[in-house]
Image (cartoon, rainbow, N blue to C red):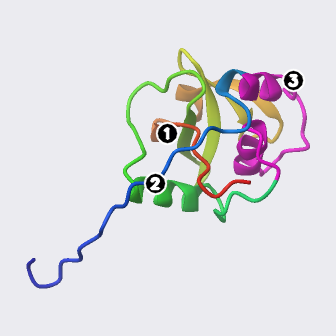
Amino acid sequence: MAWGEVAVERRIVPRVANPRDSEAALNWQLERVGSAAWQDWPLKFQRMAFGYAHDSGWHDAADAVGWLNHHDLLREGAAPRGALVWYQAADRIRVACSLGSGQVVGPLLTGPVEIAELSQLSTDCVWSDPHFPFGH
């Protein structure tokens, strides 16, 4: 190791099944389209959609992306249906759920839960499997 380099040990994070599978989570979200109750809570909304009632262990979406990146769990390219899509918008990182074909659902920039084309929200995005390692 050269002077100034930092060695980071990536550990394998065990993957457990979410309380709700992706289709059930998407149905839960679609039932809430139009609701303004989730404004500014996109991470909490996704956590609840996948069946976790309590805190995710992450402060916000940026914290989640940092953790997912550190554990090599982020992907580029088209997000499959049911994946979490992490995108940069309005000077912060937000999260929505992929419906496939470039569409996402969640509490978007304007506040209410909506369906939108990801390309209209951001060109800076990555995706991950719906993984909530600290959820309960």
Pair 3/2: label in front: 2
Mark sitting on residue 128: 1
Mark sitting on residue 31: 3
At numbered mark 2, what does the secondary structure look like: helix, strand or loop?
loop
Kind of residue indicated by mark 1: Ser
**Residue ID at (46%, 35%):** 123
Image x and y of residue 52, in percent: 76, 47
Image x and y of residue 6, in percent: 23, 77
Q: Quadrant of residue 61?
A: bottom right
- The earlier-in-sequence mark between 1 and 3 is 3
Q: Which of 124 and 15 is in front in this view?
A: 15
What is the total number of numbered labels drawn onto the structure image? 3
Cα–Cα span, label 1 and label 3: 23 Å
**Residue ID at (47%, 40%):** 125
For disc 3, the neighbor class at 10 Å (few under 14, some 14 to 19, many from 20) is few
Relative placement, left or right, of 43 versus 6 is: right
Q: In this view, does 72 lie above or below 112?
A: below
- The earlier-in-sequence mark between 2 and 1 is 2
Cα–Cα span, label 2 and label 1: 14 Å
Report the span colored magenta.
24-53
Q: Quadrant of residue 55?
A: bottom right
Q: Quadrant of residue 120?
A: top right
Q: Mark 2 points at which residue?
A: 13
